[in-house]
C-alpha cells in the first residue's frame, strides 16, 4: 500500500508551477538540484530543463577541482532545456589555471542558450602571492562575451578584462566587476558599450594596501585615484553605486583630478569601509547630491573603541549635502568610530525618514550593555528631520 504522506508530499510538489520550482533551484547549489531526480518519476529529468543553473561550490565538492570540473561538464551534457536564463559559476576555493578552458566552454554554453544573467567568480591559486604578481594566471573573460548583446545582468569577480574590439552589451542593466587588473581605458570601453546600465559596482583590488610596504601602498593609491578619475565621467548615468574601502580612500585625489565630481543620477550608494577620516567620507557623500538611500557596511577590521563620549566633527558642508536622503542602513561591528559620521548624517539629512542600525554583538572588553549605550547615543543626536525613526537591532556573528 502506498504511503499516504508520500502521496500528499508528491501532490504538493506536483501542484507548484514550474517557474516557482526553477526559482527554488536557482537558490540551491546544483548538486542539490540534481538530487531532486530521486523524488519521483516526474522529477527524474525535471532538473535537466531548468533555465537557472547555479554551480556554486561553497556547498559542493570542496577542495577537489577535478571533481568540480567533471560535475559541471556532466551536468551541462545532461541539460536539454529551451534556454539558460541565469548561469552562475562561483569558485570559493582556488582552482588551477588548467580549468580555465572548461570555464570558457561553460560561458559559451550559457551564451548559446540565451543567458541573460551571468555570474563568474574564478578564484586563482596565485591570489596569495601578491609580491611580483602580474595577473597572468588570472582567468581572462573570453572575447566572445563582449559581443553578446542579450545580457541584462553581469557579475565578474577575480577576472581579468582585456578587450580587442567593441563591447556590445546593449541590454545590460547591472554590471559588477571585481578585477585584479582593469585598465581605465578598458572600463571606459565597457561603459561606452552599456547604454542601458543602471547598476555599476567596481572593485579594483581586494584589501591590498594594508598588506604591502608603504611605498607600494602609496603608489597603488595614486594609481587608483588616477584610474577612478578617468572613468568617473563614464559612470555618471548609473543610479546605484557601491564603493569599497580602496575607492573611498582615494576619493579626495579623485575629486581634485576630475572636474565632473558630482553623480547627479545616483539614488543609492553603498560604502564598505572604515571611517577613520570623516572629512574624506563627507567628501564622498558630497559627490552624490541626489542620494536617497545610503548603505554603510563595516569592513570588520580588528580594533575596538569603547569610548562613547560625544564626538564632534566640523567640515565645510555644501548646500546640496544630503538634501534628498530618505533612508540610511548601517551594519557595524565592534567599534564606535562611526558615530561622528552618523552625527553628521542626522544633522544635515533634513528629509530623512528612517535609519536602520544593525550592530554586531560586542564582545569583552566592551561594555556588556553596548546595545543600550548605542541606542542612547543615537537617540540623543540632533536630527534635522522631525519624521526620522531609528531602528536598532543586534546581530550575532
Image (tube, rainbow, N blue to C red):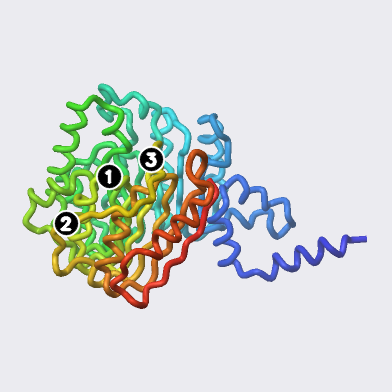
Q: What is the count of numbered marks?
A: 3
Q: Please identify, in this view, whether the residue under mark 3 or under mark 2 is nearer the observer.
A: 2
Query: How packed is label 3: few (under 14 Cα within 10 Å), some, or many (20 or more)?
Result: some
Q: Which residue is mark 2?
A: 315
- Identify the residue at image location x=32%, y=38%: 206
Q: Considering only order in the chain, which callout, 1 or 2, is on the residue closer to the N terminus? A: 1
Residue 168, image quadrant = bottom left
Q: Are marks 3 and 1 in contact (CB under 8 Å)?
A: no
Q: Which residue is mark 1?
A: 276
Furthest residue toward bottom:
387
Quadrant in which the N terminus is drawn: bottom right
Looking at the image, can residue 13 be seen?
yes
75 and 225: which one is in front? 225
**CA–CA distance between discs 2 and 1?**
15 Å
- Identify the residue at image location x=70%, y=67%: 14
Q: Position of residue 140 (x, y in %)?
A: 31, 37
77 and 370: which one is in front? 370
**CA–CA distance between discs 3 and 2?**
51 Å
**CA–CA distance between discs 3 and 1?**
42 Å
Q: Which residue is mark 3?
A: 104
**Left or right: 355, with 256 as reference point:** right
Query: How packed is label 1: few (under 14 Cα within 10 Å), some, or many (20 or more)?
Result: few
Q: Considering only order in the chain, which callout, 2 or 3, is on the residue closer to the N terminus? A: 3
Query: How packed is label 2: few (under 14 Cα within 10 Å), some, or many (20 or more)?
Result: few
- Identify the residue at image location x=28%, y=37%: 180
- Identify the residue at image location x=58%, y=66%: 20
Secondary structure at badge 3 equals helix
Looking at the image, can residue 171 be seen?
no
311 and 333: which one is in front? 311
Q: Are marks 2 and 1 in contact (CB under 8 Å)?
A: no
Amino acid at each position: 500500500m502506498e504511503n499516504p504522506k508520500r502521496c500528499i508530499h508528491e501532490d504538493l510538489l506536483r501542484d507548484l508551477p514550474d517557474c516557482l520550482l526553477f526559482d527554488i533551484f536557482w537558490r540551491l547549489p546544483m548538486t542539490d538540484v540534481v538530487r531532486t531526480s530521486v523524488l519521483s518519476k516526474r522529477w527524474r529529468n525535471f532538473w535537466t530543463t531548468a533555465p537557472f543553473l547555479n554551480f556554486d561550490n561553497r556547498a559542493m565538492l570542496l577542495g577537489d577541482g577535478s571533481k568540480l570540473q567533471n560535475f559541471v561538464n556532466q551536468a551541462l551534457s545532461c541539460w536539454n532545456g529551451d534556454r539558460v536564463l541565469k548561469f552562475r559559476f562561483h569558485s570559493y576555493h582556488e582552482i588551477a589555471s588548467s580549468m580555465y578552458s572548461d570555464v570558457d566552454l561553460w560561458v559559451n554554453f550559457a551564451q548559446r542558450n540565451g543567458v541573460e544573467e551571468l555570474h563568474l567568480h574564478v578564484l586563482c591559486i596565485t591570489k596569495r602571492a601578491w609580491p611580483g604578481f602580474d595577473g597572468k594566471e588570472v582567468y581572462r573573460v573570453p572575447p566572445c562575451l563582449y559581443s553578446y548583446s542579450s545580457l541584462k545582468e553581469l557579475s565578474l569577480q577575480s577576472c581579468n578584462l582585456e578587450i580587442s574590439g567593441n563591447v556590445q552589451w546593449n541590454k545590460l542593466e547591472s554590471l559588477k566587476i571585481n578585477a585584479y587588473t582593469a585598465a581605465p581605458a578598458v572600463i571606459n570601453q565597457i561603459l561606452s558599450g552599456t547604454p542601458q546600465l543602471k547598476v555599476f559596482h567596481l572593485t579594483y583590488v581586494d584589501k591590498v594596501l594594508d598588506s604591502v610596504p608603504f611605498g607600494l601602498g602609496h603608489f597603488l593609491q595614486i594609481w587608483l585615484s588616477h584610474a577612478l578619475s578617468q572613468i568617473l565621467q563614464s559612470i555618471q548615468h548609473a543610479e546605484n553605486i557601491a564603493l569599497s574601502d580602496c575607492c573611498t580612500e582615494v576619493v579626495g585625489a579623485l575629486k581634485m583630478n576630475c572636474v565632473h565630481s558630482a553623480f547627479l543620477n545616483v539614488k543609492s550608494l553603498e560604502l564598505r569601509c572604515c571611517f577613520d577620516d570623516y572629512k574624506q567620507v563627507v567628501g564622498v557623500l558630497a559627490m552624490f547630491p541626489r542620494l536617497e538611500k545610503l548603505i554603510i557596511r563595516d569592513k570588520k577590521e580588528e580594533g575596538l573603541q569603547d569610548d562613547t563620549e560625544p564626538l564632534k566633527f566640523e567640515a565645510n558642508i555644501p548646500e546640496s549635502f544630503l538634501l534628498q536622503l530618505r533612508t540610511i542602513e548601517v551594519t557595524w561591528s565592534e567599534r564606535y568610530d562611526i558615530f561622528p559620521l552618523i552625527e553628521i548624517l542626522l544633522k544635515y539629512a533634513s528629509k530623512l525618514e528612517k535609519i536602520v542600525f544593525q550592530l554586531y554583538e560586542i564582545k569583552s572588553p566592551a561594555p556588556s550593555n553596548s546595545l543600550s549605550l548605542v541606542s542612547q547615543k543615537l537617540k540623543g543626536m540632533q536630527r534635522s528631520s522631525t519624521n526620522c525613526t531609528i531602528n536598532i537591532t543586534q546581530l550575532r556573528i
